[in-house]
Amino acid sequence: MKRKENKIKTIFFMLLTICMMTVLMHDSVSASNVRLNRTQVQIVRGDTYRLYVKGTTAKVKWYSSNAKIATVSNGKVTAKKKGTAVIYAKVNGKKYACKVTVVTQQRAYIDTLQRQINIQRRRYGFNSYDRNPLLQRAAQKRAKELAEKFSHARPNGYSWASAISMRYNFKKASELTARYYTDPQEVVDAWMSRASTKAKIISKRYNEIGVGVYLDEDGFLYYAVIVAVRK
């Protein structure tokens, strides 16, 4: 009888051990599958974005590294001020992070415009344009000037190319302009529909870009893109 009881105890403890190992393995696998839907995101100031945790039904605690830049409530991120913050989701003692970059509407338009241009270049087998800070400043200056005079000639009568700093010694350069469009994608679509401007976007002669977007006091948008190659 005693031997039978010992055998039953042994079997019980073996089953208990197997159950515990199964639970631990399940927890390990589950933990490895837990993740945020995004690890980084760009949000326009004043807009919101929804983050959520995948792979778990456990309670999530949300908090921001800088509530002045971005706040979070139940995964809803609100962009408050230009800058960078990290949104954390804490699940079962482990933290998961998403880097949030808050930008102005103008910056978002600039980034979108360049991204759409580079998508077209890659579609035709060309490398993406690299953004150059000197061309960037020139393009932003030109976008503002277009609100005063919509022309490839500047308000002072000089060529648009005179807006490029002398520190940027370019071999060739071209300018693309547009106005009144409210969606950067529509701007690129319009340029791609015309042979003269399409040639500047998918040209192999240029490798650097500057993108400028200006919103005037009446709410109209002006776009200037400069593509160039150095000597």
Image (tube, rainbow, N blue to C red):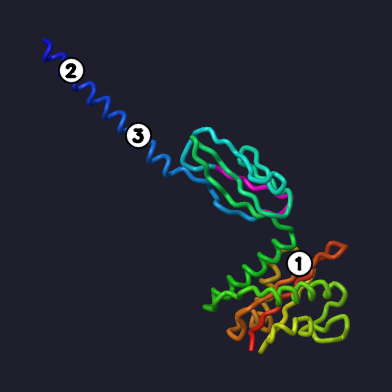
Of residue 158 and residue 183, the one placed in the foreground of this image is 158
Of residue 92 and residue 200, the one placed in the foreground of this image is 92
Mark 3: amino acid: Leu
* Quadrant holding the N terminus: top left
Residue 130 is drawn in which quadrant? Answer: bottom right
- Residue extending farthest to the top is 1
Residue stretch in magenta: 43-52
Kindly identify the residue that appears in the image at 31 percent across and 33 percent down: 22
In the image, residue 194 lies at what x, y percent?
68, 80
Q: Residues within 10 Å of mark 1 (few under 14, many from 20)?
A: some
- On screen, residue 27 versus residue 133, left or right, reads left
Residue 17 is drawn in which quadrant? Answer: top left
Q: Which residue in the structure is indicated by mark 2? A: 8
Kindly identify the residue that appears in the image at 66 percent across and 75 percent down: 132
Is 141 rendered above or below residue 5? below
Precedes in sequence: disc 1 or disc 3: 3
Please state which of the two labelled residues, at mark 1 or mark 3, is closer to the viewer.
3
Precedes in sequence: disc 2 or disc 3: 2
How many angstroms separate mark 1 from mark 2 (CA)?
80 Å
Q: Which residue in the structure is indicated by mark 3? A: 24
- On screen, residue 89 versus residue 24, left or right, reads right
Please state which of the two labelled residues, at mark 1 or mark 2, is closer to the viewer.
2
Which element type, helix, strand or loop, lies under badge 1? Answer: loop
